[in-house]
Image: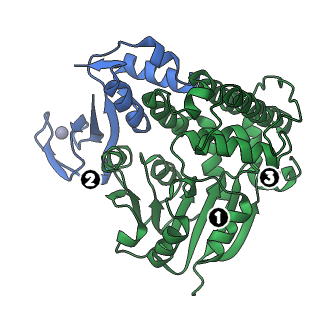
């Protein structure tokens, strides 16, 4: 379970480049198709929580969440991605062993 | 109790509509009273109504609103309300229900699973009704972009997320005594800056605005902390306050109290504390669904 930053950039050649980094910082990359340089400023990145192989170990805890948030958590587990507002809750669920992430 | 509905409606039209209308909202608010009476009965029956903020919040709010007498005896029975249909109103009732499942007597005795309370806190912060409540307040208080904002007791950073969704602050600093929470907040709202500090007196910058949204209950010494906040505020700077008080929803006040509050206040007590250092700019609502106002640094 980690926080990642991603951005989708369009290269001059028409290629669509997806960039994902662990930190929000200014970046210069090369288009894998044409080799042109693509500049990305720090504030272009969108942050999100990435869940790698997380599974529920304590359904009672998950069941005790509010319906809305329960759905958000289950959706996050299914898609592997969660909105950043969910981060504190996911950290707590992991810390109490309700979620096991590898 | 619902006398304030007109002023509330003026400012909280959006929220009320999202809740499914005024009647739906009233049903939701009735549930807060119903649960508060239930919890009070449970902690009294088990002798758990001792010296803790949770019990104190139930006692003072139910007494002030005429549901119990001074000895704590229930004098007005509350009928189980109808379930509201609106999404936010239902979320609100469900929050009370989840808290209820933890056991009021256990909570009053501090025998409850702390992790469950911690998880409930984070859960509430992302619930739709809570998000829209705060957003509506900021809009009603005429919050604008471009301000240097200070957030006391920034906890997990949820408020910063809401602010950045609707405004573009020139600077956003949150301070929080708990360093572990500061790290979490940095992940939640990377645009903002979070500092591990016990008080606004430890913050060097000066700010245009302070967001005191559900914060005063955390301050060990509110009078002293408000003085520090005043020092951190520029002359003429504004303090936006939204604070659940004893005259607000007894159930929600009790929940926030159980989540680590050190105080409960009446709306008058809140104003008296603020008066020591600030001047009232505009009072939006006195009590329902919380005390909401804008205060200003006295020097222009
Ligand atoms: Zn290219």
Q: Position of residue B250 (x, y in %)?
A: 72, 41
Q: Residue furthest bottom?
A: B300
In what element is the residue under mark 1? loop
Chain B drawn in what color? green
Residue of label 2: A42
Residue A59, quarter of the rendered image: top left
In which chain is the residue bearing label 1? B
Q: Left or right: B3 with respect to B13? A: right
Residue A83 or residue A67, whichever sits in front? A67
Q: Residue at x 78, y 30 (%)?
A: B34
Q: Left or right: B208 with respect to A101? A: right
Residue of label 3: B8
Q: Position of residue B196 (x, y in %)?
A: 32, 57
Q: Residue at x 31, y 53 (%)?
A: A43
In which chain is the residue bearing label 3? B
Q: Spatial distance from mark 3 to mark 1, Cα to Cα?
A: 15 Å
Chain A drawn in what color? blue
Give the number of the disc on residue B142. 1
Q: Spatial distance from mark 2 to mark 3, Cα to Cα?
A: 41 Å
Q: Are marks 2 and 3 on the same chain?
A: no
Quadrant hosting ligand 1: top left
Q: Report if the CB atoms under discs 3 and 1 are less than 8 Å apart.
A: no
Near mark 2 (Cα within 10 A), the count class, few <14, some 14-19 or many ≥20, is: some
Q: Are marks 2 and 1 on the same chain?
A: no
Q: Position of residue A94 (x, y in %)?
A: 33, 25
Residue B92, quarter of the rendered image: top right
Q: Spatial distance from mark 2 to mark 1, Cα to Cα?
A: 30 Å
């Amino acid at each position: 379970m980690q926080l990642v930053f991603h951005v989708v950039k369009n290269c001059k050649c028409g290629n669509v480049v997806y960039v994902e980094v662990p930190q929000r910082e200014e970046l210069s990359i090369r288009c894998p198709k044409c080799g042109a340089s693509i500049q990305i400023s720090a504030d272009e990145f969108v942050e999100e929580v990435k869940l790698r192989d997380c599974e529920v170990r304590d359904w009672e805890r998950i069941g005790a969440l509010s319906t809305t948030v329960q759905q958000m958590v289950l959706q996050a587990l299914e898609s592997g991605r969660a909105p950043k507002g969910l981060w504190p809750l996911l950290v707590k669920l992991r810390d109490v062993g309700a979620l096991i992430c590898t | 109790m619902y006398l304030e509905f007109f002023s509330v409606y003026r400012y909280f039209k959006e929220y009320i509509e999202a809740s499914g209308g005024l009647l739906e909202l009233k049903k939701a608010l009735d549930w807060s009273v119903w649960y508060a009476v239930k919890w009070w009965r449970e902690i009294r029956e088990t002798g758990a109504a001792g010296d803790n903020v949770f019990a104190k919040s139930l006692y003072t709010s139910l007494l002030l609103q005429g549901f119990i007498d001074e000895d704590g005896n229930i004098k007005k029975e509350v009928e189980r309300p109808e379930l509201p249909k609106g999404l936010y109103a239902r979320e609100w009732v469900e929050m009370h229900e989840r808290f209820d499942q933890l056991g009021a007597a256990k909570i009053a005795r501090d025998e409850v699973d702390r992790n469950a309370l911690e998880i409930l806190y984070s859960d509430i912060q992302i619930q739709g009704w809570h998000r829209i409540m705060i957003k509506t307040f900021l809009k009603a208080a005429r919050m604008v972009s471009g301000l240097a904002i200070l957030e006391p007791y920034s906890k997990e950073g949820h408020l910063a997320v809401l602010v950045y969704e609707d405004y573009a602050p020139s600077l956003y600093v949150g301070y929080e005594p708990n360093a572990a929470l500061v790290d979490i907040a940095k992940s939640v709202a990377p645009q903002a800056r979070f500092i591990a500090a016990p008080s606004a007196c430890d913050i060097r910058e000066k700010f245009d605005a302070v967001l005191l949204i559900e914060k005063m209950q955390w301050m060990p010494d509110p009078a002293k902390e408000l003085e520090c906040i005043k020092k951190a505020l520029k002359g003429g700077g504004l303090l936006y306050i939204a604070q659940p008080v004893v005259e607000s929803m007894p159930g929600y006040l009790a929940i926030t109290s159980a989540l680590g509050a050190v105080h409960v206040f009446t709306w008058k007590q809140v104003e008296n504390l603020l008066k020591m250092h600030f001047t009232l700019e505009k009072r939006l609502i006195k009590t329902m669904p919380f005390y909401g106002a804008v205060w200003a640094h006295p020097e222009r």
